[in-house]
Amino acid sequence: MNHPASEGPAGAGPLGRSLTRVEDAALLRGLGRYADDLATPPGTLHAAIVRSPHAHARVLSVDASEALAIKGVRAVLTGEDVKRWAHPFPVGVRGAPMEHWCLAVDKVRYVGEPVCVVIAEDRYRAEDALDAVRVEYEPLKPVIDPEKAATEDAPVLHEAVGGNVVNERHFRYGDPEKAFEEADHRVSIKVRFPRNSCTPIECYVVLGHYQPATGVYDILSNFQGPYALHSVMARALNVTSNRLRLRTPPDSGGSFGIKQGVLTYVVLMGLASRKAGAPVKWVEDRLEHLQASSSATNRVADMEAAVTADGRVTALRYDQIDDCGGYLRAPEPATFYRMHGNLTGAYGIRNLTVRNRVVLTNKMPSGLNRGFGGGQMYFALERLMHQVARRLNLDPLEVMRRNLVPTDAFPYRTASGALLDSGDYANTVELALRDGGYDELIRRRDQARAEGKLYGVGLCAAVEPSISNMGYITTALTPEQRAKAGPKNGAVSTATISIDPLGGITVHVSSTPQGQGHQTVAAQVVAEVLGVDPAGILVNVELDTGKDPWSIASGNYSSRFAGAVAGAVHKAALKVRARLANIAATMWEADAERVRFEGGKVFIEDGPSLGFHRVAGTAHWSPALLPENETGGLRETAFWTPPQLEAPDDDDHINSSLCHGFIFDYCGIEIDRVTGEIHIDRYVTCHDAGRLLNPMLVDGQIRGGFTQALGVALMEEFAYGEDGSFLSGTLADYLLPTAPEAVEPVILHTETPSPFTPLGAKGVGEGNNMSTPVCIANAVADALGRDDIRLPLTPSRVRGLIGIDEPPAPEGLEPLAAPKAGGPALQARDSVEVPASPQTVYDTVLDPETLRAIIPGCHALELEGENRYRADVTVGVGMIKARFAARVQLSDLDPPRSLRLSGSGDSAMGSASGSAHVTLVELDNGHTRLDYVYEVDVGGKIAAVGGRMLQSASKIIIGQVFNRLAQRLTGKPAGGLWQRLRALLARLFGKGGAS
Amino acid sequence: MRAPAEQRHAIELELNGETRHGSAEPRTQLCDFLRHDLGATGVHVGCEHGVCGACTVLVDGVASRSCLMLAVQADGRRVDTVESLARDDVMNDLQQAFSRHHALQCGFCTSGILMSCVEYLERVPEPDEAGVRDMLSGHLCRCTGYTGIVRAVLEVAGQRRTGESQQQALENRNDV
Amino acid sequence: MKAASFDYVRAESKREVLQLLHEHGEDARVLAGGQSLMATLNMRLTQPKLVIDINRVEELNRIRNERGHLAVGAAVRQVQLTDRAELAREVPLLAKALPWIGHFQTRNRGTVCGSVAHADPSAEIPLCLVTLGGTVVLESLKGKRREVKAVDFFQGLLTTDRQPRELISEVRFPLAEDGADYHFQEIAMRHGDFALVALALCLRADGAHLGVGGVADRPVAQTLPLGDELPDALNTLAWSLGAQDDVHASAAYRRQLVRELGRRLIEEPSHARTR
Ligand SMILES: Cc1cc2nc3c(=O)[nH]c(=O)nc-3n(C[C@H](O)[C@H](O)[C@H](O)COP(=O)(O)OP(=O)(O)OC[C@H]3O[C@@H](n4cnc5c(N)ncnc54)[C@H](O)[C@@H]3O)c2cc1C
Ligand code: FES
Ligand code: FES
């Protein structure tokens, strides 16, 4: 089925071939050197982090004295230390005086926010001490929904800012008002893009080593760049940038943008080392990673298109809200602006208005995530295009064709300023339709539908930007603010080639790869230029800002390797070749232009010939033989930046990326009417990524991105409760596709080389993260004829879209409660019957002795005030138990009719609070029925890892309270709900009942 | 055997064919012990709750999550990690097939996956694609989309059945 | 994510296990396959003072077919049953359900009794045990050996009738009835995930005995009439389970699956997916 990737420019050299990777030998044998595998200096200590269980709270006090008394604990770093030594992180927008420190100093603003760091002799001991740190919080009302957060009366995260909207910009290109006025149709759509993450399998690792003599923070971390953030970290550490020596290990276990977020921990562990007076290592665990590392930005987009009668879109209106979480962490609000130049997608739309608002909510800070900004943008744009077709009763493919940027228009300047470097969209679409079997897919759809099945076809066309303009982020500033700050632009990449005295070639690139095979491709490029065997070349990808060449664009992001870094390698190789040619030409008294490099030899056609190492060795061993101007030694560093990447102009035009690949995807899906499961019948993805340097690696990137995108479409979401609790805390809650869910896409290629990169290559790593979620969403919309498609399309959600027409519940089995929107996460009601009069029951409840007895696991109860107690309780279900320092209160007393019983507490496992309103009803037999309606909020670890079980668990625990009460009054356990149900079922089914 | 908390207890096991000695507290996870005490850093840790599969090793020949075992439980057992697969610096057929099929990118999931495959191919010499995918469901790979892994495992199963050597396989491949 | 400290004992005999449970009660935890316990230890969701490892207690590692049931000892791993060729004849429902549990790597270590002890409402083994009317054998040093019906054993989320000093020494699955057919079906978010809804069916000529997992706070089984009365009976069953919303599925969805998938399974059992 699969169309093989082209073999590229089939020259004699290695470039363009599917060479297997040089990286593989070490990785397959377990000999990789990832951050946690490297030797640590003697005396290295280990850190564990106290994190907030609350989404929003004031930190009243942090008391670490007990923790410090634990054997093996060496130091505790608190917000006080951080305030003394460090600065808040610089923020990418002006006029919003929010402070983001590496530790909470005044408030916590998301679940999992670091509050202090315990430093001990090993990780186990450090974690022992976490429980011993006493943090007192004053919980505040959280806000989770970005639209609510943008309103006037929402709780404010940063009081100094005054509101949660920290940046708002309006843009206008062309004449959108006129276009909308003249349009035959106006089609609009409102969509939400959820939070998710490409979740690398290796988590963050930081080894901080503060050197007091020089004031240097020497820090090793699996940071992925961009190195523009080095200055953010140096500023936060309050040192000149040369005093932050940042190093990366040889191997990294995946990143996909996420390991940009380690930057705050780089600072934190630097300070931890300073505090402990020793090197400090921190290895993030999966629970920490899921709740508090980084996430894609969730977005609410309101979009409208002005459309002519024949389906041509003449203008677009975007009104978008990006939810960046508790803090605007650099490089946010880049999620918006990375795509700003290509907001019109693959279409030639000249009129555009945009309103971008950045809001903060009580969630973890967002950041880079593969497909950065593209998943969000195309979800809105391509759903809208689908909607246009539906509204106008046109074929979505036709609408797409009518709007594509025409082939003769390249390089094409978009309305908002991107320069689409090259492409042939129309022909790529036709090729993909032909080679991917589109007509057959449509036939399959028709046939499936004729058989009564739910089958849909979805499409997506997208421009995939790569090689970011480091200045795009300043589009978030007004032209005036930009003028003040000075222009920012470009994307400097670097590469160095050293040739040693025996001709050994070592290449260094500052691209910090995480599995993309940069070593292989860099070796291919150098081998091609120098005519040597790529297997003999060593490529070093460790980056040490203390001694390697690097610049702000260093790092691995925005798919910049093939276009930019490989280009710099190429440039460095050409420099080396020119010098060697010159040396050889001098020796042979020939013209340098005639010197050839091939097969490990340097020669002149039909003339003299020497081994490559001999010519190279001359530069070291025999400087006397060197030509004039030749300095000896052999090491060349090349820097490369494309001139096309200019700073935004005064009208906010921005060429946000250098290269623009093109993707055209379509798929056919079938939906199980009963289960709501989506079966992907076929997925075709066609890429024009310019020249392909190693087709096998390109297809590997496509498959990986595609599978992540499948997860985004079908199952992945960071879920938050209304109370701000984080509900996706384990890999059994946050679901990634596994092999049986993965499908193999049909991958097709065309190649329109980029005129702007040295090798004609463009980025290819992120396209499907942009195109696939919406392509599948469009297919579901097509299958179900529905507009309101939300991701992820879980079986339950899809079944909901199909419609669940429930027969009514038999009498006595009506559901107990429907939680009200916006309330606490868990609400329910229950009742229990007690053989005593309401007055007796009431009096019993008010007796502290009773209270102690009926609270499950109550070790101690101490009167604090009238009907207010402090309690020490251990509660839980099954083997899962936590000890809470709790407060218990009886209020709203209306004897003997009703009262409220509430409690709240903190434990090492998180926080919990609950309140039950109890009504006492006198029954005919003189007994009392206690009806209780309760609500429970849980936060921290319990909520994060127990999601699936929270409802049942709180039901059990609350139930225990009332059953114990009944037991106390009667001496025997009360019939619980389940016993009653069994009795009821027995009645309904006659014999046996439920068994 | 009784091992009090917070004390290290002697552990002797056969790691990749060699007898090794070490000591660990009762609570120490087997993966931590293998990595940090015995130096088998090819064992990777991705979740510590049994889901990602990166830490999978063979315990007495059986694929097991080493994050869900205590180091003390491995006392007297045979443990094989990814480091055991290559002989005399030559990768085994499975490793070579992984490279040919680009079945790894960052390589972090790979060691665990290889160890599952070792046991699986012994138990199921003639697997089909659905079977291989089912076996792989106990592993998370974020880079590859699994296709290369599935192809590599199926190819090696085929080769082992027909007795075709890796060298031949390679030559046949280059012919097409 | 590292466990709190605990003492560890590698037990050599059942008696030693019972002795330790007797001495330590609530403070001790049995370590069987560790596929649930170890993660909760690592997360510090449970902090026992003593962990009693039963993995090397040979007398608990027995599978016996006797007196109309298959008795599976406490140290028997799930993989030992999937490897047992006779299982498809002996307890066909279990043979069909086992492959749905987690992954081959977790079945390699996870035990049958451990799954019963843990009492996850979505777990397959407890569902089979309840549907088949099996029993759980509990032993303690001083008390009487008890054989408890599965339906009474499971009392709610992670909650069972096991007392702190008791060991589940074995569980007993009734052997296949003549003339009955057994089927298993499960919907989960992914391969190997805990079930959103799991259905275990024993189909007899005069009725269907349907077990449902993943919906109520414990597995529930019910005998249902065939024919016209089936939809109503399924509806009653669906509503009786007290389904709840969670991040992965709504209560209404779960109820609907009980109704529609239940009917599909009962009326066209051959279409059930296998794994
Ligand atoms: C990735 C993954 C996926 C999984 N998916 C599923 C799934 O889909 N379905 C499913 O059912 N399970 C699943 N599991 C859980 C697995 O089945 C466990 O094996 C099972 O829940 C517990 O068995 P265990 O032998 O591992 O017990 P352990 O983890 O050792 O113990 C569990 C609990 O039972 C107690 N216990 C164990 N044995 C006894 C005994 N004989 N007497 C008294 N108490 C005892 C322990 O003290 C502990 O409290 C999964 C696990 C993982 C890691
Ligand atoms: S680390 Fe053991 S399964 Fe993930
Ligand atoms: S290769 Fe990176 S996670 Fe599998």
Image (tube, rainbow, N blue to C red):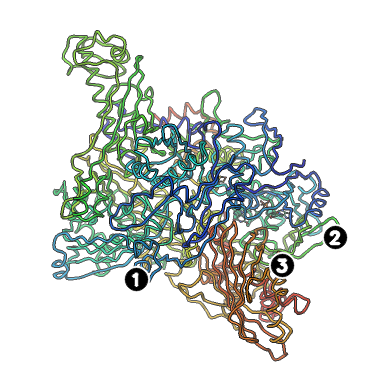
Displayed-image quarter of ligand 2: top right
* Amino acid, disc 2: Gly
Judge depth for marks 1 and 2 and give the one in front: 1
Query: Looking at the rendering, which quadrant does residue B148 occupy?
Result: top left
Q: Which residue is mark 2?
A: C143
Spatial CA distance of label 1 from label 3 is 54 Å
- Residue A778 in view: no
Q: Is residue B118 left or right of residue A965?
A: left
Q: Chain of mark 1?
A: A
* Amino acid, disc 3: Val
Residue C9, position in %: x, y? 75, 45
Residue A742, position in %: x, y? 45, 50
Residue A537, position in %: x, y? 37, 24
Q: Residues within 10 Å of mark 1 (few under 14, many from 20)?
A: few
Q: Is residue C42 left or right of residue A77?
A: right
Asked if marks 1 and 3 fall on the same chain, the answer is no
> Residue A342 versus residue A112: which sits nearer the camera?
A112
What is the number of the mark on residue C95?
none
**Kind of element beneath mark 2:** loop
Query: Looking at the rendering, which quadrant does residue A750 occupy?
Result: top left
Query: Looking at the rendering, which quadrant does residue C119 occupy?
Result: bottom right
Q: Which residue is mark 3?
A: C151
Spatial CA distance of label 3 from label 2 is 22 Å
Q: Chain of mark 3?
A: C
* Amino acid, disc 1: Glu
What is the number of the mark on residue A152?
1
Instruction: Check mark 1 vs ligand 3: CB closer than 8 Å? yes or no.
Output: no
Q: Residue at x 36, y 37 (%)?
A: A696
Q: Residue at x 32, y 63 (%)?
A: A165
